[in-house]
Amino acid sequence: MNETVMKLGSCGKCEQCPVHHRSICRAASAEAMQELSRLSHTRNFEKGTVIVAQGDEADIVGNVVSGVVKLTNMSMSGQQNIVGLLFPSDFFGRAYAETSRFSYEAATDVTLCSLGRQAFEGFIARHPEVEHALLLNTLDELDAAREWAAMTSCHTTMQRVATFLFILSQRSDNRFCHSGDKIPHVIIALPIGRRDIAAYLGTTPETLSRNLQTLVRKQILRPIDTNHFELVNASELVELTGEMREDLESMYGTGKLKA
Amino acid sequence: MNETVMKLGSCGKCEQCPVHHRSICRAASAEAMQELSRLSHTRNFEKGTVIVAQGDEADIVGNVVSGVVKLTNMSMSGQQNIVGLLFPSDFFGRAYAETSRFSYEAATDVTLCSLGRQAFEGFIARHPEVEHALLLNTLDELDAAREWAAMTSCHTTMQRVATFLFILSQRSDNRFCHSGDKIPHVIIALPIGRRDIAAYLGTTPETLSRNLQTLVRKQILRPIDTNHFELVNASELVELTGEMREDLESMYGTGKLKA
DNA sequence: GCGGGGCATTGATCGCGATCAATCGGCCGT
DNA sequence: ACGGCCGATTGATCGCGATCAATGCCCCGC
């Protein structure tokens, strides 16, 4: 893992945290930051670790510093539904709930900036500006969840795949630019395995694979390795997402995600 | 419309509001309630009225007092996606956003307790306990939206229909009890038309209708009129909500037998 | 290098649910 | 009552995507 991140976090130097300007911490006053630095500490989890299980006491909250966290809903029949994905700077956990309604699982190796739930609740009670930031953040997430729900319920599998890829391509983490090139090469890094992506998109690994290969055949994607594609033709990808493109842009362009 | 509600609302007597103990107002202090009484006023909307259109300035917030509000996401191709339904006591509108990402439309005749968005923002800034209640409310809605999204992405149409009916049956508004009966008759009132329900469930009116008729044939529902069913066998409905098992057989078999 | 296991891809088949289309039923105004 | 209109139901057909199955691919440990 990234040792720099670890050291900065464990020193409590929130000002140097790589995500502090994007997470809810951005609203914290100077003294609040200092208090946060004392209360919080980073923790690392290996890929596959269940950080909080569904129904457990949800006693940890915090921010994702690096990696991807899967938010899953186990149905009684045993199969796990992916409800959402948390990326760096996303808030993690569920404040003000005794138990968690979802499982939080490390989809990759993950670094979290965490603190106890009750400590956090006390903290934001003392710092209303952070509670306000949490409110704004939650409202945005609610909008995003509703838009995603609307999308999955009414569109074809290809539209969902295209939308998912488009969202990933918008993440600045995934943008790379060779110094000499005029055109930025947008690399889409699939953060998790096919099975999980398929579950998130409400389809199967087989169908997902077929759709990806279709995009490759259409010269929209160029495969680099199993988990990386170059986005060759972004506009055609957007076409395939259907009619929601400006929603997506507003969601990921002006929202909490972009710096 | 309900004139009693109107009068109570327009007089600003929040204490007598039929939903004030369930909405976020329940957290307001006595003085906050008085301020709310001055700031808010009830408004009635006829069925079909677009209260706030997608992209409009979202300058009204409040609570649903009676009726059902559709939360929709219009795509440019014209078809509208139903993102959520708001029932009495649900919070309405989007605080802290210049424009609304969804349309709010009266699915039935609707009574709202409304106030200006900026007035509301000022109000909760002066009354942190209400802001806190809004935060809790929003967190709950986020969980609910994610659960719904998980459900729609992975389950069959019958499971979605059963879940929807089950949720409706859980609303106390829909429980009625004949005085002499030992067993309460649970009446499920479909609050909106088939087209809208189908859109909400990510299916078509035809498939929805077929599934409802299947439930009637299985003696789980008894039709009263087009928009009202009696829930005869709640436990079987719950069964259909979860794992499917050999429903295919009984569905298919009953259909052939009865026809 | 060799073999094994997990994941991704490709192939073949089948059924659910969308679609097109017709009929039925309630509710309106004239 | 009558006809027109809209919504709900029922019917017939077809395609997308789930499922089962096989192959290919990569990364391990030995």
Image (cartoon, coloured by chain):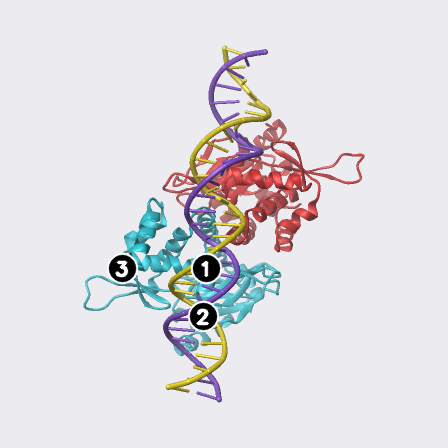
Chain colours: A red, B cyan, C purple, D yellow
Q: Give the Cα separation between the discs numbered 3 and 2.
A: 26 Å
Which of the pair A145/A201 is nearer the observer?
A: A201
Callout 1: SS: helix
Query: What residue does disc 2 label?
Result: B108
Determine whether, in the image, residue A236 is placed left or right of residue A114. right
Q: Give the Cα separation between the discs numbered 3 and 1.
A: 23 Å
Instruction: Report in which chain the residue with disc 2 lies.
Output: B
Which of the pair A141/B229 is nearer the observer?
A: B229
Q: Earlier in the sequence, mark 1 or mark 2?
A: 2
Kindly tell me whether residue B220 is visible in this rendering: no
Query: What residue does disc 3 label?
Result: B232
Which disc, if any, is residue B198? 1
Q: Callout 3, which amino acid?
A: Val
Q: How many marks?
A: 3
Give coordinates of residue A149: x percent, y percent.
Answer: 51, 52
10 Å crowding of disc 2: few (<14), some (14-19), many (20+) = some
Q: Callout 1, which amino acid?
A: Ala
Give the quadrant of the N terminus of chain A: top right
**Residue appearing at x 32%, y 48% in the figure:** B249
